[in-house]
Amino acid sequence: MNLATTSDGTNHQGRRLSRYRRWQARKRAEFQARRPRSATRRLARRAQKERRHATHVSSWPFHQLGHHLAYKARKAGVPFLEVDARHTSQRCPRCGHTERANRPTRDHFRCRRCGLAGPADVVAGVNVRDRARSAWAFVTMPVPHPV
């Protein structure tokens, strides 16, 4: 499971988070098997603790992740630009061909027009990077003076 993939191919995986969740599930099952009187309250507290940990370890929904990144970038004085990620995993960065069949499986990309192949997450990362570069050029373009 990849939580995020950058345009240079670096994967950020969720192995530690998955291991933590399995450990929490095992603890929950042990606790429920014993059935102490305070089970409901203690299970609710454990669920909150697991939710906080997951949020801390970057298991955010994309919308929340975007807000968190924008906040951190603004705080550090780094420009932040959000681009539309629609069809980025189906578009070929080499020839621009966009088709659902370009992504035959969840993990693989293969362009039906030019034959470019690779990991689907990396291809999507490259497309997002390229969109951001072109949008950044448009945003920072000097305003023409009226004649």
Image (cartoon, rainbow, N blue to C red):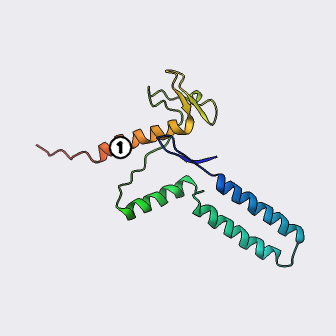
Res 41 → quadrant = bottom right
Res 102 → quadrant = top right
Residue 142 x, y percent position in the rendering: 21, 46
Res 71 → quadrant = bottom left
Question: Which residue, given by chain and number where applicable, does mark 1 sit on?
Answer: 135
Q: Residue at x 59, y 60 (%)?
A: 57
For the residue marked with disc 1, what is the amino acid?
Ala
Q: Is residue 122 left or right of residue 36?
A: left
Answer whether residue 87 is visible to the viewer in this image: no
Q: How many labels, in total?
A: 1
Q: Is residue 57 left or right of residue 95?
A: right
Q: Residue at x 84, y 66 (%)?
A: 30
- Residue 69 higher or lower than 112, as above or below: below
Residue 141 x, y percent position in the rendering: 25, 45
Neighbour class for label 1 at 10 Å: few (<14), some, many (≥20)?
some
Which residue of the protein is positioned furthest toward the right in this rendering?
Answer: 34
| Quarter placement of the C terminus | top left
Q: Looking at the image, which is closer to me, 66 or 120?
A: 120
Which residue of the protein is positioned furthest toward the bottom in this rendering?
Answer: 37
Classify mark 1: helix, strand or loop: helix
- Residue 50 higher or lower than 129, as above or below: below
Residue 103 x, y percent position in the rendering: 59, 31
Which residue of the protein is positioned furthest toward the left in this rendering?
Answer: 147
Q: Residue at x 51, y 38 (%)?
A: 124
